[in-house]
């Protein structure tokens, strides 16, 4: 949400949070704030936010509210208008003008004697351009209640507002049909907050179908439109189910209609509830209201999307741990969860703490003794036996059961007045004695408190993090302070600006010194591109362009410049305005660029055809990559909003030319986005115009490129990397000779983005860091002769980094086999824990299984025993055919057979490592994307460089590190190769594993 909206109505980033008015600051005249509309449909917390205007600024709404009551009905005298305003207390109560004007029933007398029998108040429509509030003289006079006077009638255009109760009295008044308010019915809800909040929002809620919808059959016969029942009215599919009535018969709010639209939804408009299979509109998700309903675990699908996803994701770290984490799945008439059929699961939660406070034997838990108050090692046999051994009863989960750990935290069990109580951990060590014998406070100043700090982190239900609880609290406090500090600075600046906001409208006021001796100054305004005038009071006709740029993988470190020009179709091909964007893919990959292009005349010439022309160059060499053309199809619009995605072509792509004899001093080039339809004449230096027939004296520096000429007769210059300025005559000094180390290339920061760093460094292979000062991790792998390689001689290296028990990252890198020896060298800049090599599709070998920090060099030989087996190779058909929630509970079995020494195995969505845990060998599984994408893979393979060493380099002891698993090691001596007998012994072990699994499957069939 932090960048910009691509759609004019902000629907591309439409969430319940984005509707919160406090979420945005529309004071600053940025692209994000100026070139969007806020629809009257947007409502937050049951309140319409922008009822009177499409502007997103709340100040404009306030001005319109004031203007609504600034003039009287044409039939009213001024005294009558003021008396009505004072007596009705609308729009505000306690109006100071009324204190003297309405003394001693003066206003009542004025209304009786001077006001017409019936009138609109206010005199302008209060909704949809045709709905009015109307009163009669008699109704106003007879109203005796305190507070604001609600309307007596609601009047509307009968052609736009239908399907009301027919058994009521209708009144025709000034071309509108009027009904009493209670006939709709619209209740009175005076809440003491204000006139709008009490009455207007009710009109928008109850009469929303009276808005001006489309009735055009051509428009309605479109798959993106919904046709209202028994009506010519239609509306966009995205309006269905948005809690606003648009159809006369309210069929757009019916659940059956919403569910039908949900089935054909192609724009992610709807959210499907898993609890009851109904669909809701996306603006109802995470809106502090449970629209899906809660399940048996008191969890609501739409209340928390992160929790919603976690409840459907099977994680091996939470299998058979005593807590039901996923929603039940019905299999063969029986509900299966992560806690069913756990007989074959090991006690893998024992001995998992990597930094225990005391050393314990296997199958023991650490806790604080209930009797001595000291840390003890409790045998697992004494856990959950009904006898409290540990302080807080933490080893007896039945004392304080947790039904739903996503919403509940662990509890501290103690006696309060001789009655067992489960105390929330926030009350432990809070300085107040809650429990008998002070159990919750007496250990807090001792080393035992460290244990409960670690224990409290186990209540972190979303990530099960092992981070120290007090570290978490401390880091959050620091983060809040930083945010608060930054926020205060910004607010202070805005307050200074807002003092002059009314003077310069959307600009910035400055004082210009005219005479220093006389101290004469003048206030002037600096206007943003979207405004002009001495007070920035007029909007510019303009093109508002949003760009998202993609570059090929091989060009990720190539620095580009894009020249974006607003041109017309005249013979001169005038460049009305232009902008230059610098783009570095590795830096700007996810950046959206916003550009204003202005016309050189005010107003623009309506008969001209305008377009946006974009040229793409490499900054270092000024090599031309191609051009795009975006026609402006709506010349009648004062502001044309365009969103474009640019795909930069490969460096070796041939620029498509064409034959056009009219290109006198240039070359005919086809546009990248429409090569079969459009082309243009790319002029040689010294020539301009549509057909390159107009001579021009280029004023750019000799080492730059003259791209075109602007409307002010200045050359459009494309500067090389080290130059800047309108004519590229100035030298950039930000990049010094020592700015980037290790032969890194210095790139100045993007002028369109605020950055604390004036430059970035493009590092050569093997280095990374802000200044290329850090060496990459280097992995040198050789392969056993018995390993078969694919024909393309390329290998995918997968890197896995773990952050906690449930969160990890998965990245991949390509490498080519060396010609002199089956080997590869791969570089990776980030720390990682596990690495796999993929020789062909889903043929994996475990390469590294240790914590690898920065600047490490790993040398290793990959053996056949390192191959990761697919589950079809190690499980029988009965287990393979099980659904994942059942099958995953057997994943420890292959690892338990120590004779095989299986390194790893995988299924469709997981990769599993076999690792020692105490005296047993267990599976450690994590999510694994087998379809991970490498951008522009074909081109990458063709251009991938070989990184190879001499054969002797693989035997170098200087590149060695220590062993990384119990069964495989990183080479500290020349790598050995397996003999035939060694391979045979592996196959014998594998045979016994298959025999074991086959017998186990027979046992399953027998028990069934």
Image (cartoon, rainbow, N blue to C red):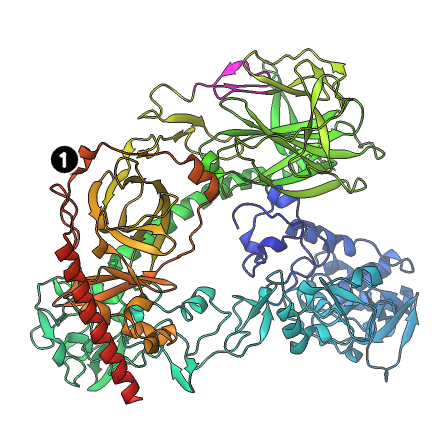
Q: Quadrant of residue 702?
A: top right
Residue 245 in the image: above or below residue 711: below
- Where is residue 452? Give x, y as percent: 20, 66
Q: Is residue 775 above or below residue 456?
A: above
Q: Which is nearer the eye, 451 or 285? A: 285
Quarter of the view holding residue 221: bottom right
Q: What's the residue at 42%, 22% (across, down)?
A: 734
Find residue 583 and report its horizontal and vertical position in percent.
52, 33
In the shown orientation, is residue 838 left or right of residue 656? left
Q: Residue at x 28, y 84 (%)?
A: 1004
Q: Quadrant of the C terminus?
A: bottom left
Range of magenta residues: 718-733
Q: Is residue 55 above or below residue 352?
A: above
Q: Position of residue 801 (x, y in %)?
A: 30, 52
Q: Residue at x 32, y 31 (%)?
A: 772
| Relative side of 103 to 3, left or right | right
Q: Is residue 726 magenta-colored? A: yes
Mark 1 sits on what residue?
A: 958
Residue 692 left/right relative to 310: right
The quarter of the picture where residue 504 lies is: top right
Residue 966 lies in the magenta-colored region: no
Q: Position of residue 767 (x, y in %)?
A: 31, 33
What crowding class fits label 1: few (fewer than 14 Cα within 10 Å), some (14-19), or many (20 or more)?
few
Between 136 and 714, the residue placed more toward the observer is 714
Would residue 414 appear left or right of 238 to someone viewing this image? Answer: left
Count of numbered circles on the image: 1
- 991 up-or-down from 71: above or below: below
Dominant secondary structure, magenta: loop
Q: Regarding mark 1 in the picture, which secondary structure is present there?
A: helix
Question: Can residue 586 be seen?
Answer: no
Q: Is residue 175 visible?
A: yes
Q: Residue furthest front?
A: 980
């Amino acid at each position: 949400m932090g960048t910009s909206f691509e759609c004019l109505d902000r629907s591309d980033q439409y969430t319940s949070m984005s509707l919160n008015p406090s979420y945005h600051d529309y004071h600053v005249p940025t692209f994000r704030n100026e070139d969007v509309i806020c629809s009257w449909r947007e409502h937050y917390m049951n309140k319409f936010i922008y009822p009177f205007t499409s502007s997103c600024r709340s100040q404009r709404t306030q001005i319109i509210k004031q203007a609504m009551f600034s003039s009287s009905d044409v039939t009213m005298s001024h005294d009558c208008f003021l008396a009505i305003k004072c007596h009705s207390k609308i729009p505000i109560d306690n109006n100071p003008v009324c204190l003297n004007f309405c003394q001693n029933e003066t206003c009542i007398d004025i209304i009786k004697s001077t006001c017409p029998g019936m009138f609109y108040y206010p005199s302008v429509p209060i909704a949809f351009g045709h709905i009015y509030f109307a009163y009669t003289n008699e109704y106003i006079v007879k109203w005796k209640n305190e507070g604001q006077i609600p309307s007596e009638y609601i009047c509307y255009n009968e052609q736009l507002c239908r399907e009301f109760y027919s058994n009521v009295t209708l009144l025709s008044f000034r071309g509108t049909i009027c009904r009493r308010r209670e006939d709709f019915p619209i209740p009175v809800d005076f809440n003491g907050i204000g006139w709008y909040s009490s009455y207007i929002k009710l009109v928008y809620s109850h009469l929303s179908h009276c808005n001006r919808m489309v009735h055009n059959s051509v428009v309605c016969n479109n798959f993106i439109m919904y046709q209202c029942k028994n009506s010519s009215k239609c509306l966009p599919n995205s309006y269905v189910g948005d809690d606003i009535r648009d159809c006369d018969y309210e069929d757009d709010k019916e659940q059956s209609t919403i569910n039908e639209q949900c089935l054909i939804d192609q724009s992610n408009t709807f959210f499907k509830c898993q609890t009851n299979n109904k669909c809701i509109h996306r603006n109802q998700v995470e809106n502090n209201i449970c629209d899906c309903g809660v399940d048996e675990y008191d969890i609501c699908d739409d209340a928390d999307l992160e929790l919603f996803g976690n409840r459907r994701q099977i994680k091996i770290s939470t299998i058979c741990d005593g807590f039901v984490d996923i929603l039940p799945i019905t299999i063969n008439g029986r509900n299966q969860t992560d806690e069913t059929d756990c007989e074959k699961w090991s006690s893998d939660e024992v001995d998992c703490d990597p930094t225990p406070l005391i050393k314990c034997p296997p199958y023991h838990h650490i806790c604080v003794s209930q009797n001595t108050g000291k840390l003890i090692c409790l045998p697992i046999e004494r856990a959950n036996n009904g006898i409290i051994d540990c302080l807080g009863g933490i080893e007896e989960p039945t004392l304080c059961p947790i039904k739903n750990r996503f919403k509940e935290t662990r509890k501290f069990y103690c006696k309060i007045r001789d009655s067992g109580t489960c105390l929330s951990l926030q009350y432990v060590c809070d300085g107040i004695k809650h429990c008998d014998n002070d159990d919750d406070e007496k250990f807090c100043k001792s080393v035992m408190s460290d244990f409960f700090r670690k224990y409290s982190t186990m209540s972190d239900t979303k990530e099960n993090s092992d981070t120290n609880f007090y570290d978490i609290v401390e880091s959050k406090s620091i983060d809040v302070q930083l945010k608060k500090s930054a926020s205060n600075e910004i607010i202070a600046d805005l307050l200074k600006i807002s003092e002059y906001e009314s003077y310069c409208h959307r600009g910035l006021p400055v004082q210009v010194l005219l005479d220093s001796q006389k101290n004469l100054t003048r206030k002037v305004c600096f206007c943003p591109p979207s405004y002009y005038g001495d007070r920035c009071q007029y909007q510019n006709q303009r093109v508002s362009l949003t760009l998202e740029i993609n570059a090929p993988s091989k060009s990720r470190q190539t620095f580009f410049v894009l020249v974006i020009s607003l041109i017309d179709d005249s013979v001169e091909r005038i460049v009305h305005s232009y902008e230059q964007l610098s783009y570095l893919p590795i830096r700007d990959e996810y950046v959206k660029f916003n550009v204003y292009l202005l016309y050189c005349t005010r107003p623009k010439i309506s008969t001209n055809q305008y377009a946006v022309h974009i040229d793409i160059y490499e900054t270092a060499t000024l090599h031309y990559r191609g051009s795009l053309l975006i026609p402006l199809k709506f010349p009648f619009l004062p502001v044309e909003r365009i969103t474009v995605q640019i795909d930069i072509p490969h460096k070796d792509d041939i620029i498509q030319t064409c034959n056009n004899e009219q290109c006198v001093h240039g070359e005919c080039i086809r546009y990248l986005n429409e090569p079969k339809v459009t082309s243009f004449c790319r002029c040689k230096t010294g020539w301009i115009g549509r057909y390159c027939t107009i001579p021009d004296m280029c004023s750019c520096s000799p080492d730059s490129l003259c791209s075109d000429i602007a409307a002010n007769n200045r050359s459009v210059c494309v500067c090389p990397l080290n130059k800047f300025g309108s004519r590229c005559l100035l030298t950039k000094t930000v990049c010094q000779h020592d700015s980037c180390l290790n032969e890194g290339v210095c790139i100045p920061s993007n002028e369109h983005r605020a950055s604390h760093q004036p430059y970035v460094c493009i590092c050569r292979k093997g280095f990374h860091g802000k200044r290329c000062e850090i060496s990459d991790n280097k992995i040198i792998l050789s392969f056993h002769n018995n390993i078969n390689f694919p024909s393309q001689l390329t290998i995918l290296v997968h890197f896995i980094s773990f952050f906690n028990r449930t969160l990890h990252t998965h990245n991949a890198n390509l490498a080519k086999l060396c010609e002199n020896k089956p080997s590869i060298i791969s570089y990776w800049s980030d720390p990682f824990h596990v690495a796999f090599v993929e020789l062909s599709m889903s043929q994996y070998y475990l390469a590294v299984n240790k914590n690898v920090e920065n600047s490490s060099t790993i040398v290793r030989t990959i053996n056949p025993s390192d191959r990761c087996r697919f589950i079809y190779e190690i499980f029988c058909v009965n287990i393979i055919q099980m659904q994942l929630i059942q099958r995953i509970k057997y994943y420890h079995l292959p690892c338990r057979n120590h004779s095989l020494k299986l390194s790893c195995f995988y299924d469709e969505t997981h990769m599993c490592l076999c690792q020692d845990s105490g005296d047993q060998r267990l599976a450690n599984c994590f999510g694994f994307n087998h379809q991970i994408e490498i951008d522009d893979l074909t081109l990458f393979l063709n251009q991938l460089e070989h990184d190879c060493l001499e054969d002797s380099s693989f035997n170098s002891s200087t590149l060695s590190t220590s062993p990384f698993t119990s069964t495989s090691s990183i080479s500290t001596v020349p790598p050995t190769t397996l003999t035939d007998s060694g391979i045979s012994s592996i196959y014998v072990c594998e045979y016994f594993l298959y025999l074991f699994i086959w017998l186990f499957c027979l046992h399953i069939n027998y028990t069934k």
